Image: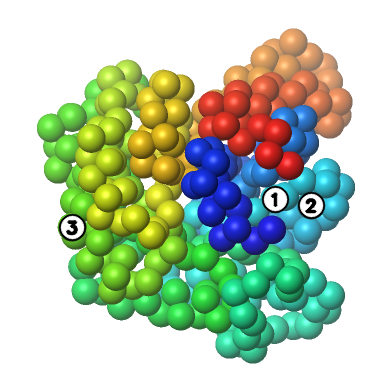
Amino acid sequence: MTAREWFIRAQNEGFAIGAFNVDNFEIFKAICLAGQKKRSPVMMEFSSGEAGYFGLKNIVDLVANARKQYGIPILLNLDHAKTVEDCMEALRLRLRSGDFAVDNSSTSEVKVPHTSEVSFVGFDDIHFDGSELSYEQNVENTKRVVAAAHAKNLLVEGELDKLSGSSEVHTEQIDLEILKKSYSDPLRAAKFVAETGVDIFASVFGNIHGTFPNQPDLDIELLKKIKEALPNTFLSLHGGSGIPAEQIREAIKVGRIVKVNVNTEIRQAFKDALNEKIGENPNEYTYYKLASDIVMAVTAVVEGKIDVFGSAGKI
Ligand code: 13P
């Protein structure tokens, strides 16, 4: 099934697919194991920093191998790409399966219809984040990404209202009044989607990157209005860490959210387990001997998210 088909199914059946950020190889393995244990599709996503660390080609190859090794649907997303060039680079790695050896340097070389019958390797979804640009520039750049991506049967996620915060464990308080000014306006969102043709809209209604001591509540009423304004567009929920499970479930139900992004809680589980193992084993110099418990700690967090998102047992 393609990413589009998975999101249609998610919307119809009332679940969301976890879009988990991959900071390192242990996290990568943990996401695969959690998807396999829960019989759930998963989306792997790489921010610019994470993609720079792994290398785009390595990412594509790792995911292609993992799809076979773990036997689960693994969708691949470039997360918060800030430049059109970064998006085009990822698009170049989207190939029909069997075309691995081709060094494809043109984004328009492989033209394919929207169909699940052709099988692909590479990215399934590109999130172009033009939220720091002027409205006009954001629309212009997003349209360029959409044209190139749709020619290769990829989905594009667009961002209009900047998601605040960063994927860290924050100790400072958020100014909730200032944050509310960044929430999505349903009519402006509908205009942006109509002008750009994005498939997924990154909605902002109380979600923020990272965890905070005064985590805001999701504005479910606003989400309802955003969904009414965008009946034919998939909605994503970024900043999935730190939000109580019942609020996430409500957002999936009311807003028919199909993709929930999670990074901070995964990074936190990894770092805590790493510190613990190193503390317990000061004389162990072989890292992989410590790694399996760390992978298990992260797997447990991802499994918990899959349960909340309702995607367990869907494969
Ligand atoms: P969190 O770090 O809050 O989980 O958000 C992740 C995210 O939205 C990545 O795009």
Residue 31, position in %: x, y? 69, 37
Q: Are marks 1 and 2 in contact (CB under 8 Å)?
A: yes
Q: Nearer the viewer, mark 2 or mark 3?
A: 3
Quadrant housing the N terminus: bottom right
Residue 103, position in %: x, y? 74, 83
Q: Are marks 1 and 3 in contact (CB under 8 Å)?
A: no
Front-lying residue, 289 or 258 = 258
Residue visible at 37% across and 52% down in the picture:
202
Q: Earlier in the sequence, mark 2 or mark 3?
A: 2
Front-lying residue, 258 or 123 = 258
Residue 233, position in %: x, y? 39, 58
Which image quarter: residue 159? bottom left
Q: Are marks 2 and 3 in contact (CB under 8 Å)?
A: no
Q: Amino acid at mark 3?
A: Leu
Query: Residue 74, labelled with which disc?
Result: 1
Which image quarter: residue 283? top right
Residue furthest out toward the top: 280
Q: Nearer the viewer, mark 1 or mark 3?
A: 3
Residue 72, position in %: x, y? 77, 46
The residue carrying mark 2 is 67
Which image quarter: residue 254? top left
Q: Amino acid at mark 1?
A: Ile
Q: Is 98 left or right of 162, judged from the image as shown?
A: right
